[in-house]
Image (cartoon, rainbow, N blue to C red):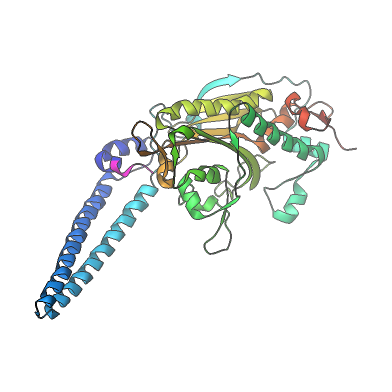
């Protein structure tokens, strides 16, 4: 959430920043609610003080043998008034919290203005798309030719947007995941963690998925429900919830491989072919928790770690900074890495790396102890895909396809493939 102090003291500046997202923050309505809150707070404190004073006078009157019935009645009346005032205060505080939790994060000054993904700004390109001297196939056609990718079997048991992988194709995805984990732990200094795949609503609220993206979540029928994680960002970032990290522990860098589950509400008709957009998919997620003054630099570092994976796989990609109209709800600034897919003749997102500054930390009460002051402060959180395994698999299949329908395994994955250096069609 945005700092409520900032909303109260600089509402006009907040409104101007959020307007870049095409989000309207009604600063006047918020200020009116805040004035009501302050007035009710004054009333509550005054009534508490009066009730306490009256309660003390009962004891004195009783000791002096006076009739305390009028005093008891007065205290009872004050109690009712206090109860009503506290109820009104709670209602206003709930309204304020609802407004605050519905506000997206403030944008970094470097975020370019724009309406949607078409206005994202390209920063760089790495690698040259391969020239093919044969007909290019997309990953669906390649998978069918190999006999290792089965959508029909998945549809029978689960419906659309699921897939079954067989044999070396399944192993290739596992190899990609293991390669990414090894790269990030051995070369980039991340600590690998294993986390739950089911979380409670508080965890999703803390990272910003709830309440705004409730329709995108799969949840159980328990009361209260559990939610299947949409990304490892949720449980990993929640490791810092309601805690204070010592300065010597900072920064914290975690990597986790998990399945991810998304209902893809509102995305019907988009990427329905193949495994680009599935209800269930695999990801290797990077999460950093850093000192506030270091989060801008940490974003460049984290994105660079994801780029390393693509470079080692020799997959051409481009890096874009998302414009104001395309930045995610909780993000302060975001880079997308888009890998080249020959089957689509287009660059497609394979990693999204974001700095959330203190937006998630405020919701989570995730803090660190500043050694200069000795006081707890909100830390900054960042995350990014390092990278999405399913999309990496698609990119390898399409970029490394051969004329005979086989797929050459990238050199860095050979140690994970039990001697197989290519995927060949099943006869």
In the displayed structure, would residue 382 be above or below residue 316?
below
- Position in image of residue 329 (x %, y %): 45, 41
- Position in image of residue 92 (x %, y %): 29, 57
State how many labels appear. Answer: 0
| Residue 145 in the figure: left or right of residue 243 | right
The residue under the point 58% across, 59% down is 220
Report the span colored magenta.
1-5
| Residue 142 in the figure: left or right of residue 183 | right
Q: Quadrant of the C terminus?
A: top right
Residue 58 is at least partly visible in this image: yes
In the displayed structure, would residue 226 be above or below residue 251?
below
Residue furthest right as drawn: 427
State yes or no: residue 75 in magenta.
Answer: no
The residue under the point 69% across, 48% down is 162
Using the rendered view, name the quadrant where residue 273 is placed. top right
Q: Quadrant of the N terminus?
A: top left
Residue 394 is at least partly visible in this image: no
Magenta stretch mostly in which secondary structure? loop
């Amino acid at each position: 959430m945005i700092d409520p102090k900032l909303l109260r003291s600089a509402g006009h500046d907040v409104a101007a920043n959020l307007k870049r997202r095409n989000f309207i923050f009604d600063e006047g309505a918020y200020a009116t609610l805040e004035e009501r809150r302050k007035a009710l707070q004054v009333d509550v404190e005054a009534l508490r003080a009066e009730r306490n004073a009256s309660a003390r006078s009962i004891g004195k009157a009783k000791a002096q043998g006076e009739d305390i019935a009028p005093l008891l009645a007065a205290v009872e009346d004050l109690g009712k008034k206090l109860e009503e005032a506290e109820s009104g205060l709670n209602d206003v505080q709930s309204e304020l919290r609802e407004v605050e939790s519905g506000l997206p994060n403030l944008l970094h000054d470097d975020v370019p203005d724009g309406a949607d993904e078409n206005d994202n700004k390209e920063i760089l390109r790495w690698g040259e798309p391969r020239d093919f001297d044969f007909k290019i196939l997309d990953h669906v056609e390649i998978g069918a030719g190999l006999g290792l990718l089965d959508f029909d079997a998945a549809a029978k048991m689960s419906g659309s947007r699921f897939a079954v992988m067989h044999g070396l194709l399944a192993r290739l995805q596992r190899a990609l995941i293991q390669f990414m984990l090894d790269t990030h732990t051995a070369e980039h200094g991340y600590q690998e963690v294993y986390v739950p795949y089911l979380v409670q609503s508080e965890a999703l609220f803390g990272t910003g998925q709830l309440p705004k993206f409730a329709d995108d979540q799969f949840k159980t029928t328990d009361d209260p429900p559990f939610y299947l994680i949409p990304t490892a960002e949720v449980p990993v970032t929640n490791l810092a919830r309601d805690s204070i990290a010592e300065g010597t522990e900072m920064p914290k860098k975690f990597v986790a491989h998990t399945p991810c589950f998304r209902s893809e509400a509102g995305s019907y008709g988009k990427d329905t072919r193949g495994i680009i957009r599935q209800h269930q998919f695999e990801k290797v997620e990077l999460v950093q928790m850093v000192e506030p003054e270091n989060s801008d630099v940490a974003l460049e570092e984290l994105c660079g770690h994801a780029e390393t994976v693509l470079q080692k796989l020799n997959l051409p990609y481009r890096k874009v900074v998302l414009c104001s109209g395309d930045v995610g709800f909780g993000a302060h600034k975001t880079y997308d890495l888009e890998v080249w897919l020959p089957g689509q003749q287009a660059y497609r997102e394979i990693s999204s790396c974001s700095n959330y500054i203190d937006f998630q930390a405020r919701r989570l009460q995730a803090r660190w102890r500043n050694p200069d002051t000795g006081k707890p402060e909100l830390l900054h959180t960042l995350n990014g895909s390092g990278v999405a395994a399913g999309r990496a698999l698609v990119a390898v299949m399409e970029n490394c396809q051969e004329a005979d329908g086989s797929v050459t395994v990238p050199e860095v994955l050979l140690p994970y493939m039990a001697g197989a250096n290519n995927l060949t069609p099943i006869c």
